Amino acid sequence: MKQIVLNHVTKQFGTRGGPDVIAVNDFNLAIEEGECFAFLGPSGCGKTTTLRMIAGFEDLSAGEIWLGDRPVSDKKKNLYVPPEHRGLGMVFQSFAVWPHLNVFENVAFPLRVQKRSKTEVYEAVMQALIHTDLAGLEHVYPSDLSGGQQQRIALARSIVTNPKVMLLDEPLSNLDPQLRESMRFEIKSLQRKFNFTIIFVTHDQSEAMALSDRMLVMDMGRIVQVGSPSELYQNPTNQFVYGFLGLSNFLRVVVDKGKLYVKDGPAGQAIPFDIPKGISGSDGLLASRPNEIDISAKPGSGYPGKIEKRLYLTYCIEYHVRLGNQTIRVHTSHANVFAEGASCSIMFKNPRWYAAESKEIERERIERQIGV
Amino acid sequence: MRYMFHKIFHTSKGMGDKHFGLDQSLFILSLVILLVTVLIPMVMIVYSTFFQDNVFDWQLFPRVVLAPENLSAIVNTVRISFMVTVFGTLLGLFYAWLIGRSDIPMKGVMKALFTIPYMFPPFFGAMAWSLLLSPRSGYLNKLFMQITGNTTSLLNINSIAGIVFVETCYYFPFVFLQVVSALERMDPTLEESARIAGAGQWYVIRRITMPLVLPAIAAGAMLILISSLSHFGVPAILGFSNNIFTLPTKIYQLISRSAGSFQGIREGAALSILLVVVVVAALYLQKLVLKTGHYDIIKGKSMRPMLIKLRGAKIPLLTISLISLFVIVVVPLFMILAVGFLKAYGLPLRWENLTLRNYQYILGQSKMVRDSIFNSLFLSISSGVITMFLGVMIAYVVIKVKPKGKGLLEILSLLPYSIPGIVLAIGVILVWSGAFVLNLYNTIWIILIAYIARYVSFAMKSASASLEQVHYSLEEAARSCGATHLESLRDITLPLIRPGMIAGFFLIFLPAMRELTTSVLLYGPFTRTLGVAIYAINAEGNTVQASALATVAILIIVLGNLALRFITKERKALQ
């Protein structure tokens, strides 16, 4: 069953003295029951605004949103259900635990609103506290707890009413890296226990990939690509998604008579690559991941380059390799040691060709970054 | 964290060792100045209440406190302050909520209007409202009697209710500003998470927003309470004619009736102790209230809070707020301005009744008025400069030097905050009219000393705020480049806090320019201040001239405020 459906959802903000900004542009999505779905994108891409429209904190400028079989926002019918009547759970980046209430009262709040009986409240709260590892801390105030524990209060508070849909707004970005890892597991196991649908917003691609069943990448208010983490990683539709999902090199290249050359590089040295049909003569980018490049000292075993710089990282050596007048990064095991200044040969193992981003898109991106 | 503290402590101590002289002498100098200007006057009040000619005499205090007319002054003081606090808090909360959380239009205009009562002394308001509502000659009352043919007036401003009304108009911004700033700093997700949990707007306001801004409400309400308890101007202007006295006006009456006899001053001192006790009790109450609620509500990414849609109530609420603001802010200012141009008080406001004669008189003919303007300018500028530097010195010692006695220094410098101006004046009289070496009575210097004591808390607070922005490493960097302690102070720290110092100067200059409470007890034949001159001319019944002079004062205050705003804007642009 479809749990959350967004049709042509658009949000426009008026800015003072400037043109309106389209924060979210014709957003269409259907999320299945029980899915864990990630919205990934840089800040200002519209992912949080979309989440807030689903939650009911922002009205739409156009389009409609359905929760299950119930419309909650519909601009055409002028329908808008306020957040308190949408029956959602939500966890905020700042945790938003109430400092004037102790742990028990924080978690009990949603039940108190519903005027549940004392025993019901007590049992439900204690259950939620056990599930979030907070049992025994009922009477403590949030200010005396760590960030991770405050995060658990927020989680306990959102599951206590057993909602079908859980919205998480950058839930882990205020935690330190180790805690972040363990909270991922806890959120996942809570989901398995309570079987709710999750939408979570993040700008951290590894978090999105590790947690989600499906995810989408947003850029400048639009969905760029939707799919499972592996689909997106294996097959990014454009340069933006490729660059957002991991470390990447973008080498400026030109196609000439069916062969690929480094732009402004030495003539006669083609990069071994099967060029997609119909792109002859155009400029483009060859995208590669630093850890998917073979590097060797043997001349002629690949594209010739020169080691510019060598950096020892913890799990690999990073080389900055000069190709023509461009530089790419290569990650290789500590077994391959080359001197700075040495010549080398480069083999791309799984490169992809993308058309270069148009000037208009570049300009829009810069304008948005300044505006937002 | 502990390591860092350790480090800071050590470095500052290290500096102190090498340059024992400078830090140590700053500390001692600050302490001595505060002891002389703040502590000794307070001690003298207690001493002269309980000692006559160096002999212990406990009988005066109960006799004064239990005298029926003083008892009624106590009752009035508490009643008035209580009502002002309640009404002022409600009014402030109402506007704060409208501006902070509703979608009411014209917020900018309203915010600007709210800052106006802050600028002017409440006794201007008392003058303006008695122009409108004094029982026989007030313009509104006369209009009412003309229209209805009644012989009794509509409203009598010379009453407890009148005093409460005028004080409320001037003190409600304390709560308004505190609460609006708390609402603006509050993380909106605290309210949003309650909405998501199923709570409606009003439930959220009651259970989440209100408890979270409670400390701000309490702080604002206590400011109102303390200000009202020690307030002199409004009850003096509105109450005397109807024999309504509060503690500060009673103290004033005791001192001025005694014509300088020591017995009168002793009685005033006894009442002062009582007033201080009441104020301290109020402060203690505030501490109790605030202790339960010290939350950190300033975190999270700043998102615009969800504004409550007023829908149908929008236009009525906007109308009510604009009208009430008009009445509170614009009407009194207009009255003072208009009456200052009238040939005589009571004449209808018509073109042919207007004249410039009042201004000619006050600015040209009256030497007393001219003197008062110069006195006030001299006092405000000199007390502004001296106190600002004193504040910087104390703040520097407390924040950067951190000597052993810094707690004492801090308490002494913040003490005047809770001492009513009238009490401070008595203390200054007791110390500086010949009790020790110097007799400064009836000179301008005694007023200057009182102003310094009165405003040192302001200066200290504003200097601390700027100094805390200056990281200790900046001075250390200068030292590591070879600068001496004094040079690093002069070339690094002082330039960095200069904008704060200039703003601090104006924060003293402006209230000093309109000061009444302290000067009214300290002025001599040639040392009237602007506030005293306006008050005296008004008390003599020369209403039109008093209004003209008040207009001059308003002009000076507005210019000062514009300068202050210009400077603080520059400062923001710098950052």
Image (cartoon, coloured by chain):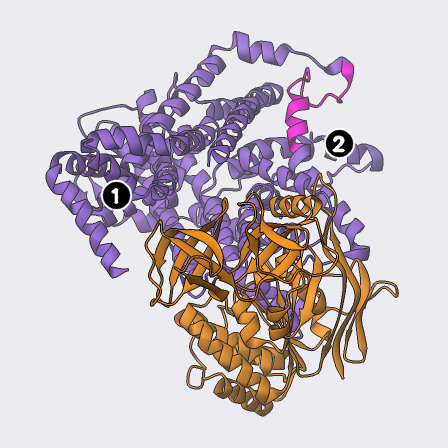
Chain colours: A orange, B purple
Q: Which residues are magenta?
A: B332-351
**Residue that label 1 marks:** B400
Within the image, what quadrant is residue B284 found in?
bottom left
Whether residue B146 sits left or right of residue B12 in the image: it is: right
Is disc 1 on the same chain as disc 2? yes
Question: Which of the pair B14/B113 is nearer the observer?
Answer: B14
- Quick one: label 2, few (<14), some, or many (20+) residues within 10 Å? many
Up/down of B119 relative to A361, above or below: above
- Inspect this view and state whether residue A92 appears: yes
Q: Disc 1 is attached to a residue of which chain?
A: B
Q: Earlier in the sequence, mark 2 or mark 1?
A: 2
Q: Quadrant of the N terminus of chain B?
A: bottom left
Residue identifier under label 2 = B142
Q: Position of residue B253 (x, y in %)?
A: 43, 35
Q: Secondary structure at mark 2?
A: helix
Q: Nearer the viewer, residue A210 or B168?
A: A210
Q: Residue at x 78, y 32 (%)?
A: B143
Image location (x, y in percent) of residue A39: 63, 67
Q: Is residue B555 above or below residue B45?
A: above
Q: Position of residue B104 (x, y in %)?
A: 72, 50
Type of amino acid under label 2: Lys
Q: Does residue A289 belong to the magenta stretch?
A: no
Q: Residue furthest top?
A: B365
Relative horizontal placement of residue A26, taking residue B84 as reference (left or right): right
| Residue in the picture at 69% in, 33% down | B331
In this picture, residue B540 sits left or right of residue B486: right
Mark 2 or mark 1: which is in front? Answer: 1
